[in-house]
Image (tube, grey):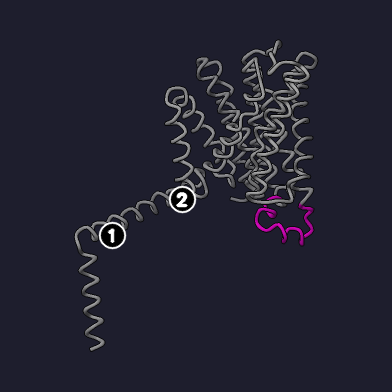
Amino acid sequence: MNSRQFLIRDLLVLFGLTGWALALPGLGSEFVVSMALTCLMYIALSSSWALFCGSTRYLSLATSAFFGLGAYTSALLLEQFSWVQVIALGALVAAAVAVVMGAAVLHLRGTYFAVLTFGMTELIRHAISYFEKSVTGTVGRVLMVVPERDTVYLTMLALAVLSVALSIVVRRTRFGLAMTGIGADEQRAQTLGVNTRLVKIAGFALTAAVAGAVGAAMSVRWTYIDPHTVFNPFIGFQTVLIALIGGAMTLWGPLIAAIVFSVLAETLRLQVPQLYMMSLGLLLILSVLYLPGGLASLRADTFRGWWRASRAWWQETRADLSGETRRLKQREKQQRERRHV
């Protein structure tokens, strides 16, 4: 298949999934729709995170900051502006903050970049908490104007589709190729004429805009928000884990992992939260050790390779337990001694 055929295939898959998601509110219960909203939220967050961080290999932990900024933008402006305008403003505010943050820290890589983005997230959270307590005299805000459930659902579906569509299109543009080049070898990309600083800031702002829009849309689910809720680091950490386990370098990996973990979250977290966190950590460890490409890299050859490796391991273990390995080593030692004699 050539590039055009892959593009058509990806768009058709996205179109089919969108049609199925559109029919869900009319067929499912309130619990199913609530789970679907969580699923769509993490599809949008993880797909946009993977678009930038998966391509450039920059590990950002600032997703919860952009999500919280979008949520507070919605809480402040929902009574003065329309729903669509509030979503757009949430994306704009998050993107503007990302430009400033990116200009300050995107010259770093690895652990330093990850730690600084997390530190800036905490700085933003505490700054808003201080402002709320000192200026407004309250800890959080009550959302008096709340759209209908179907409006929120359709908005989140549109944002999830937009996020995946951006990944499909951007990965095929010069901008996407430039981000991939930065991830492969940033110095070489610079020598080839890529303005790496501008590309990194633009990519960082793009993923922040999606997170801000998602935060603005999801804030109405709580009707009352405070910094601890919307700037929760768990939102950022789970987004990173979903993208990594699904396959940050792939297109459909974050979507697959978001569905898996949304179902796990709704079925396990409320009843046995420790088991949910253990499952999350176990899947991350297994993915890093045995599936570095994520869930999207699973193929028939992968399972055959695991089967061959497990059979070889069992044969070696059985030989060790039966003493066959020890006897074989002794025979080899005796043969070496005879040759020397």
Relative to residue 336, is residue 126 depicted above or below? above
Are the residues at dot 1 and dot 2 in contact (C-beta closer than 8 Å)?
Answer: no
- Spatial CA distance of label 1 from label 2 is 21 Å
Disc 1 marks which amino acid? Glu
Q: Is residue 182 magenta?
A: yes
Which residue appears at 65% of the width and 12% of the height?
148
43 horizontally vs 274: left or right: right
Q: Earlier in the sequence, mark 1 or mark 2?
A: 2
Q: Is residue 270 magenta?
A: no
Type of secondary structure dominating the magenta stretch = helix
Residue 123 x/y as whole percent: 71, 34
Taking depth in this image into account, of 87 and 138 the one nearest to the observer is: 138
Relative to residue 317, is residue 281 depicted above or below? above
Q: Which residue is mark 2?
A: 289
Disc 2 marks which amino acid? Leu
Which residue appears at 62% of the width and 18% of the height?
221
In the displayed orientation, state which residue is furthest to the bottom: 341
Which residue appears at 70% of the width and 32% of the height?
66
Taking depth in this image into account, of 216 and 156 the one nearest to the observer is: 216
Residue 13 visible in the snapshot: no
Q: Which residue is mark 1?
A: 316
